[in-house]
Amino acid sequence: MRSVSPACGGTAVPLAITWLVWGTTYLAIAFGLRGTEPLTLSSVRFLTAGLLLWGLAERRHEPRLTAPRRRRATLVGVLLFSVGMGGVALAEEYVDSGTTALFIATVPLWSVLLNTARGRRTRGAEWAGVWLGLAGVAVLSAGLGRGELTGAAILLPAAICWVLGSHLDDHSAGMRGPAAQMLAGGAVLAVAAAVRGEFASPPRPTWGAVFALAYLVVFGSLLAMAAYRHLTAHTSPALATSYAFITPVIAVLSGVLFLDEPLTPHVLAGTALIVVAVFTTLLTRSRPAAGPTTTVPGHPEAVRTRRRPTA
């Protein structure tokens, strides 16, 4: 009888968490928007998660952030959470949750373009992934109505800002760094919600929206992030980032099953193109494994984490 290695057992659970939780994040946002405005929902989500993370950092007696790190955390938090995830929630007022996930799944492709602009050599397979991904975005956009194109116009800058924020993050401040980012992002979202007039009338969330918010805080922003960090420390980059081409499929199927979202030919073709593009890009980027590396995630909740050198 074959025995299961500890490494396999220690990988399966966090892998399943990243796949399932981040695959259903967009569904949870759709439920959360029932009776709650998008920027308000995002603000409460990240302020709550940030306070919980900050409390954990206090319990672990982590050092306080220096002034330069506080400034960097503020900037990164605005890019990641205010524009990135706030844009996702705002866009879901216009487009289906599955389509939203597909647009955000292009994050690794924008990362390739950013690295190229910074002078990094880009392989032919990576360029192929970028062009396939852009073709998938074009196919998806061709199937959108006029109102839905507004959502697409929000999602592309959101994905690009997520890439910029990920590259600016120094990833070396323990729990306090991500906590400060979420608090800064949540605070800016609260101001944006007020400017947008979302506080003009009190929110009337359904019970489903309340449970969705709790799910987004506990599972989406805390548990899945911990699972992802475990994977980046103990597995290959290819396996750790495999959620990037799994979660869009889960998101599309979740929208079809629970929200009756249509599975149109444009969605099917766009899904296939983007999944293949992300798979090609991440597989190519994972090949050089000498020395410490960083992974750029395809889901806007992960934090790029420096891998430990293998023995």
Image: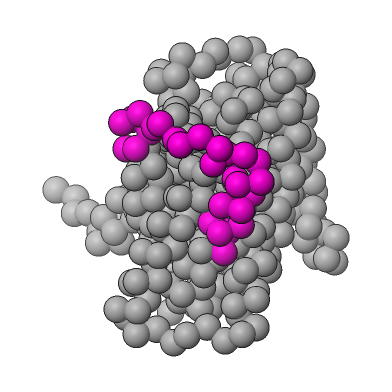
Where 277 sits versus 124, above or below? above
- Quadrant holding the C terminus: bottom left
Residue 232 percent location from the top left of the image: 47, 63
Please tell me which residue is depicted at 44% across the width and 87% down the height of the picture. Answer: 63
Q: Nearer the viewer, residue 43 or 118?
A: 43
Instruction: Please tell me in which quadrant of the rendered image residue 286 appears.
Output: bottom right
Horizontal side of residue 167 vs 207, given as left or right: right
Per the image, is 213 magenta? no
Per the image, is 201 magenta? yes
Please tell me which residue is depicted at 58% across the width and 30% down the height of the picture. Answer: 92
Instruction: Please tell me in which quadrant of the rendered image residue 122 appears.
Output: bottom right
Residue 126 percent location from the top left of the image: 74, 48
User: Can residue 80 be seen here?
Assistant: no
Question: Magenta residues, as a range?
Answer: 184-211
Please tell me which residue is depicted at 60% across the width and 47% down the height of the picture. Answer: 194
Residue 10 percent location from the top left of the image: 29, 59
Residue 113 percent location from the top left of the image: 79, 53
Horizontal side of residue 74 vs 305, given as left or right: right
What colour scheme does the image use? one colour
User: Can residue 294 be seen here?
Assistant: yes
Of helix, strand and loop, which mostly describes the magenta segment? Answer: helix
Q: Residue furthest left?
A: 1
